Amino acid sequence: MAVRLLLLLGAWMALVGASGPVLVPDISSRNVEIRTSFTGEELLLFGAIIYEGGLPDAPAEVAVVLRGPSEPILLREKQKVAGIWVNADSHRFRSVPGFYALASSAPIDRLIDARTAAIYEIGVDNLQLSPGPGAAAEKEQRMEAGLIDRMEQRGLYAETPTGVEITDNVLYRARISIPSRVPVGVYRAETFLISEGRVLAVATREISIGKSGFERFVALAAERHGFLYGIAAILVSLFLGWAAAAIFRKRV
């Protein structure tokens, strides 16, 4: 990793003369493959901060965000009626990140104000979830809170307020865990350099998470040949049911 970082520093030395500091980020793996045995992975996001004219007096802080592909989601709210859970209400979100993880060198509310955090969408509570039209403000807030809570329970949304280590005010690194049920697609890793309540620099890298091997074959079959895939799934289910019944009869 040290050699890789030195090469990046050399490539960016021409930017030292630019106004303000420059971030030089990198990732331990640009491609994550999901196989049958995939149980999750830990990514290392690291890099360096290049300053103009030497190190500043105020220490720098770093926040790293890893965001997954967005998609529309229909959230249903359940209520218990006569002892039975039923769908009582629903709300559609037009754009929801399938994964969101934040690691920072200190709690975000100590680094920047709420307005700046909302502009850059730093923190789970500052995500712009694009709710559908027509809902009352109270309902939107309730549904957003329920959606975020659900994603956190599934391990798809997470925050680590002390997850970034900074060495000599120049080098930084953060570890972000990818759960086994992570959605596939192109992810965006954003690094924010923060000092005295202001975002001084932002750098972005992309990560591809996709299925491979038999998992990829099944996913492509379901996407390209949906009808045939459905028929095959029904036939497999019927066969497994028949086989289980036959084994049970023999044992009896």
Image: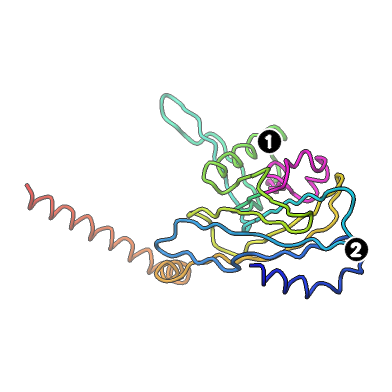
Judging by the rendered image, the residue that carries numbered circle 2 is: 52
Lower sequence index among marks 1 and 2: 2
Vertical arrangement, residue 114 with respect to residue 195, above or below: above
Instruction: Tell me where the magenta segment starts and ends, as one range.
Output: 103-132
Residue 33 painted magenta = no
Q: Which residue is mark 1?
A: 141
Residue sitting at 50 percent across and 36 percent down? 87
Residue drawn at point x = 79 percent, y = 60 percent: 49
Residue closest to the far top: 82
The location of residue 118, given as percent across then percent down, is 78, 45
What amino acid type should be assigned to the residue bearing mark 2? Answer: Glu
How many numbered circles are shown?
A: 2
For mark 2, give the secondary structure: loop
125 sits to left or right of 184: right
Q: Quadrant of residue 68?
A: bottom right
Give the residue at x 61% y 41%.
Answer: 148
Question: Extreme front residue here?
Answer: 168
Say what amino acid the circle numbered 1 marks.
Gln
Q: Quadrant of residue 207?
A: bottom right
In the image, residue 201 sits, relative to residue 130, either above or below, namely below
Q: CA distance from mark 1 to mark 2?
A: 44 Å
Q: Which image quadrant: the N terminus?
A: bottom right
Q: Is residue 234 left or right of residue 148?
A: left
Q: Residues within 10 Å of mark 1 (few under 14, many from 20)?
A: few
From the top left corner, tell me how far across and down residue 110 is, in percent. Answer: 78, 39
Residue 184 at x, y percent in the picture: 54, 62
202 and 118: which one is in front?
202
Question: For this rendering, which residue is in front, 178 or 18?
Answer: 18
Question: Secondary structure under badge 1?
Answer: helix
